[in-house]
Amino acid sequence: MPKAYVFTQYGGPETEALVEQDRPSPGPGQLLVAVRAAGVNPVDWKQRVGYQRPGQQPRELPAVLGNEAAGVVEEIGEGVTGFQVGDEVFGNPVAGGYAQYALFPVAVTAHKPAGVSFTDAAALPVAAATAYDGVRQLALPAGATLLVTGAGGGVGVAVVQIARTDGLNVIGVAGEGKKDLVESLGAVHVPSGRDFADGVRAVAPDGVDAVYDLVGGEVLESAAELVTDRTKLITAGGKDIVEGLGGSPVVRARTAAVLDEVARLVVDGTLDPLVTQTFPLEQAADALRTVEEGHARGKVVIEVAA
């Protein structure tokens, strides 16, 4: 039977398990995909401890982990057009991507370009698409200065690259161990920590034009003090407090059109998903711990054998 990495109840890592599950069948508007790679994101472990997006129904347990994946179409559900068995695709699975098989809704599934590997494609639907949506939401003119907190993680490295392509000056806050990574993308590195705001003021004494926060909490609160126009304060990490600071959450488009666009950026060399670590499905626990403990540089991906 096919394998999947699940959490059996809400809680810590002890609730996770590699299990065997029946191969799912696609419903109307869905594709059954043989997964070749699945991206790992902070939202994965947050869902395990009970986080739900607004309006999202509680998941039936055990629930497969993972929110982005790439693979090959095996079956097509009723009413689906534009896809055929054998197509290589990537997108947001209906109910988890850390598995040998997953169901994809066609609304958030795109064809994988031939020049993009499954591993890179699996890093795009959450991380790169979130980065893209946020940079477009800010709509900054060329020459503006953007502060990115959490600049060394999976979303952060994509934000920096897309912003630099748009002609923005970028200040990236990240740990000292990620300094070389952040600077290699064309951003000015500021070490994370309690005094990071002082480091930002040292390189941008007049403040910054916008903030793209990926950390939340006290980091978001400190970053808010660095931008004069709070409408240019957005976050993917502190949605619970950002409106009280005068900012807003990143507004996600969640469309196949955005997936096509970020894939195009990869093909033309504008965007490198920067997958720095891969793990087989049997080591999904190690992959998730790497992200959950904040040790990831760039993007972590689980690779699934054909």
Image (cartoon, rainbow, N blue to C red):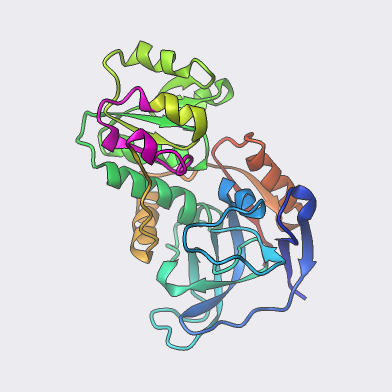
- At 47% across and 88% down in the image, what residue appears? 78
Please state the total of marks drawn on the protein image: 0
Residue 88, how many percent across, how many down? 50, 69
The outermost residue toward the front is 244
Q: Quadrant of the N terminus?
A: bottom right
Does residue 86 appear in this view?
A: yes
Is 144 contained in the magenta span?
no
Work out whether residue 190 or residue 252 is closer to the camera in this orientation and state it: 252
| Vertical arrangement, residue 293 with respect to residue 302, above or below | above
Q: Quadrant of the C terminus?
A: bottom right
Is 241 contained in the magenta span?
yes
Work out whether residue 141 or residue 276 is closer to the camera in this orientation and state it: 141
Does residue 184 appear in this view?
A: no
Figure quadrant of residue 213: top left
- At 37% across and 33% down in the image, what residue appears? 245
Residue 285, how many percent across, how many down? 74, 50
Q: Is residue 162 left or right of residue 192?
A: left
The outermost residue toward the left is 141
Q: Is residue 98 left or right of residue 144?
A: right
Residue 60, how many percent across, how many down? 66, 69
- At 26% across and 39% down in the image, what residue appears? 166
Residue 191, how many percent across, how many down? 50, 19
Q: Is residue 134 left or right of residue 83?
A: left
Work out whether residue 60 or residue 203 is closer to the camera in this orientation and state it: 60
Figure quadrant of residue 272: top left
Which residue range is magenta in the image?
224-246
- At 44% across and 38% down in the image, what residue appears? 241
